[in-house]
Amino acid sequence: MSSSQQRRGRHRADGTKRAEILAAATERFGRDGYETTKWAAIAADVGVGPTALYHYFESKQHCLFVILDDAVQMALARFEGIAATHEDPVQALHKVVADAFDVTSHDVQRLRVLVAEHGLLAVRRSSPREEEARHVARARTRALELAWAHLLEQAMEPGAIPDAEPRMLARAVLGLYNSVWQWYRPHGAIELDAVSDFYRTRMLELIGLPADLDEARAA
């Protein structure tokens, strides 16, 4: 095996282990809380010593910022994909609202972490790696908010939804959506489908759209 092949093999192994650490940390932070989770517990979950984690992340907080960015990055990519494939902004809004609840149990834990620890993105870090990760996650959060505002503005222009300040409305809709993950837990007493039906209708009402897409188009 050549040295270049060996390097590629090590990079793949590093990437796999890093993904395992992120997955374990997401589950721990989402279930038990970020503050109460011990760095050593995450190491044990992935079968490495605590010092080995520092090969991948500078600190528990660095790991947290990456998880927050991953959550927003996934949401933004899905939002942009739907918006790009639906010229009708009303149809796009219905689709992105429905898609926001098409999540796995692991996605839910990541969203719970995002909602619980989002405030930390406003606090500058002295560590360069932590600060870089914080800055990236914060910038992507703003990009998601602006993407929502732009789509809402597109729907306002032809009068499909009532006029409002687009960014403020985007924040209101996202705030309602994010409130779900403060209390919802996978495999809890309330099924996600029931949560989705209830909140999807309220999010659309907040935007100014009927819950039924055909009715919204007719209006």
Image (tube, rainbow, N blue to C red):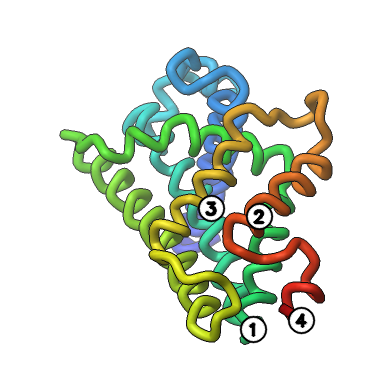
Seen at 70% across and 28% down, the residue is 185
Q: Earlier in the sequence, mark 4 or mark 1?
A: 1
Q: Where residue 114 sits: x, y (%)?
A: 49, 38
Q: Where residue 182 sits: x, y (%)?
A: 58, 30
Q: CA distance from mark 4 to mark 2?
A: 24 Å
* Quarter of the image where the N terminus is located: bottom right
- Front: mark 3 or 4: 4
Q: Quadrant of residue 28?
A: top right
Query: Decide: marks 3, 1 in contact (CB < 8 A)?
Result: no
Q: Earlier in the sequence, mark 3 or mark 1?
A: 1
The mark found on residue 38 in the picture is none
Seen at 57% across and 40% down, the residue is 111
Disc 4 marks which amino acid? Ala
Q: Earlier in the sequence, mark 3 or mark 4?
A: 3
The mark found on residue 88 in the picture is 1
Q: Which residue is mark 2?
A: 100
Q: Which residue is mark 4?
A: 218
Q: Does residue 10 appear in this view? A: no
Q: Residues within 10 Å of mark 2 (few under 14, many from 20)?
A: some
Q: CA distance from mark 4 to mark 1?
A: 13 Å
Query: Decide: marks 2, 3 in contact (CB < 8 A)?
Result: no
Q: Secondary structure at mark 4?
A: helix
- Residues 191 and 138: in front is 191
Q: Earlier in the sequence, mark 4 or mark 2?
A: 2
Disc 2 marks which amino acid? Ala
Q: CA distance from mark 2 to mark 3?
A: 12 Å
Query: Decide: marks 4, 1 in contact (CB < 8 A)?
Result: no
Q: Secondary structure at mark 1?
A: loop
Q: Residues within 10 Å of mark 4 (few under 14, many from 20)?
A: few
Q: CA distance from mark 3 to mark 4?
A: 23 Å
- Front: mark 2 or 1: 1
- Front: mark 2 or 3: 3
